[in-house]
Image (tube, rainbow, N blue to C red):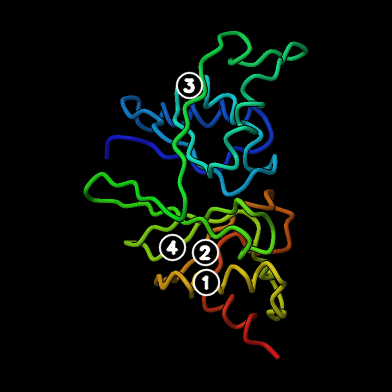
Amino acid sequence: KDLFVVLDAQLSSENVELIIAEAKKIAPDKPIRYFAFCHHHPWYIGGVRAFIHNGTKIICTKDDISYLQFIADAPHTIQPDSLQKKHRPLQVESLDSQMSISDGQMELKIFHIGMKSAHTNDYLIFYLPSEKMVFEGDLVSVPKEGAITKASVTQAGFYQAIKDLGIEVDLVIQSWPTGEQRSSKHTIPFKEIETSVLMK
């Protein structure tokens, strides 16, 4: 009710400046207090410099802090972004296995599933218990059309991580790939992921 949490920042400061501007349109008095990303690849962290300039606290694993500092300190002189024009210090809040952000009404739980993702050792997923919904980056692939196919290693890892956490999930929202031409679903019923994992 009194702050924004933004998840994932694709590719460039320019994209994140658009996110920040849109948040101000939606609720001018709400700060973007936190930014968190599912893992360190550029499709999820590439625009983080704009959040650093905005004074947003970055949530990450301890292993990602040095990389974030490298990104924050890197010169951007060819196409100067907001952080190049006015440097601000990196603010970080790290987590080990999990953390929670709540306003007393809505709660966001962040879980570090790491190598259970079969993708990266810093993988985070984001859970809204009231919605029974998980947001993640790129672990799942369920086709928009046609039959469900057998789960990939990352999809099976994600499914097992959910089971190990013991959380109730009805819906999964995936941020990648973007664009209307993608062949996989962006919004996936968890039962379809389960079907794919249990296929022989």
Contact (Cβ within 8 Å) of mark 1 with mark 2: yes
| In the displayed structure image, the side of residue 167 where residue 86 appears, left or right | right
Q: Are marks 4 and 1 in contact (CB under 8 Å)?
A: no
Task: Name the front one of labels 2 and 3.
Answer: 3
Q: CA distance from mark 2 to mark 3?
A: 29 Å
Mark linked to residue 133: 4
What is the C-alpha distance between the residues marked 3 and 4? 28 Å
Q: Is residue 18 above or below residue 120?
A: above
Between disc 2 and disc 3, whose residue precedes?
A: 3
Three-letter amino acid code of the residue under disc 3: Asn
| Residue at x 64%, y 80% (from the top left corner) | 196
195 relative position to 170: left or right: right
144 or 11, nearer to the observer:
11
Find numbered disc 2 in the image and state the secondary structure of the residue it sits on: strand
Per the model, the C-alpha gap separating discs 2 and 4 is: 6 Å
Alpha-carbon neighbours of circle 1 within 10 Å: few (<14), some, or many (≥20)? some
The numbered mark, 4 or 1, whose residue comes first in the sequence reads 4
